[in-house]
Image (cartoon, rainbow, N blue to C red):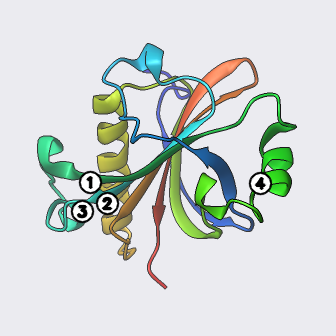
Amino acid sequence: MSELDTPSFYRMDLRAPLIYQKNSGQAQLSDDSAENTGFRVYCFRLDPEQGKSIEPERGQFLGDLVFSGFEPQNQGGVKGFESKNATNNPGMIVQIPGGIYLFSQKREALGKNGCIDLAIEQQKDGLWERIKLQNLLYIRFLFEDGKHVTQVFRPVEA
């Protein structure tokens, strides 16, 4: 594994929310990495026990899907969508709110198991550093510098 393949974990101060259009149904995170492309976001409530364990069980790690969303196309991007629809239809908007996060990314589109593995490694790193993490996990897919990217955000307790 090269240095570029190894995920890095950072504390990030997200100053402004990352805003998406809410999926009308609850679109699930795919096991197939090819389907996890484009500009998408998923928010999961983690299993309470697994979300605080240094050795969580992968199959039990993710709890309920809270929401999923996508970046709207042909509407001026997220900012155009936000300004056009947020005030009239706040129920159409989902977001990763501004705040302090433990953050990591991998420069490829991961499938569900790869996302869980990345989130578990992030959790282990956070617990090792004695960072108190909230019980939510945001998974974001985007396209950056000609490559697919998977990002994982875990809110840090205040």
Whether pointer 4 and pointer 1 mark residues with C-beta atoms closer than 8 Å, the reply is no
Evaluate whether residue 93 shows in this view: no
Q: Amino acid at mark 1?
A: Asp
Residue at figure coordinates x 46%, y 14% from the top left: 34
Residue at figure coordinates x 53%, y 28% from the top left: 3
Label 1 vs label 3, nearer the camera = 1
* Image position of 72 with respect to 21: above or below: above
Q: CA distance from mark 2 to mark 4?
A: 27 Å
Local packing at callout 3 (Cα closer than 10 Å; few below 14, some 14-19, many 20+) is: many
Q: Amino acid at mark 4?
A: Asn
Q: Nearer the viewer, residue 68 or 5?
A: 68
Q: Secondary structure at mark 3?
A: helix
Q: Amino acid at mark 3?
A: Gly
Quarter of the image holding residue 40?
A: top right
Q: CA distance from mark 4 to mark 1?
A: 27 Å
**Residue named by callout 4:** 85
* Image position of 130 with respect to 34: above or below: below
**Residue named by callout 3:** 51
How far across and how far down the image is residue 131, in percent?
40, 74
Q: CA distance from mark 3 to mark 4?
A: 34 Å
Whether pointer 2 and pointer 1 mark residues with C-beta atoms closer than 8 Å, the reply is yes
Q: CA distance from mark 1 to mark 3?
A: 13 Å
* Image position of 131 with respect to 69: above or below: below
How far across and how far down the image is residue 29, in percent?
37, 33
Q: Secondary structure at mark 4?
A: helix
**Residue named by callout 2:** 45
**Residue named by callout 1:** 64
Give the mark, 1 or 3, whose residue is nearer the N terminus.
3
Residue at figure coordinates x 37%, y 36% from the top left: 115
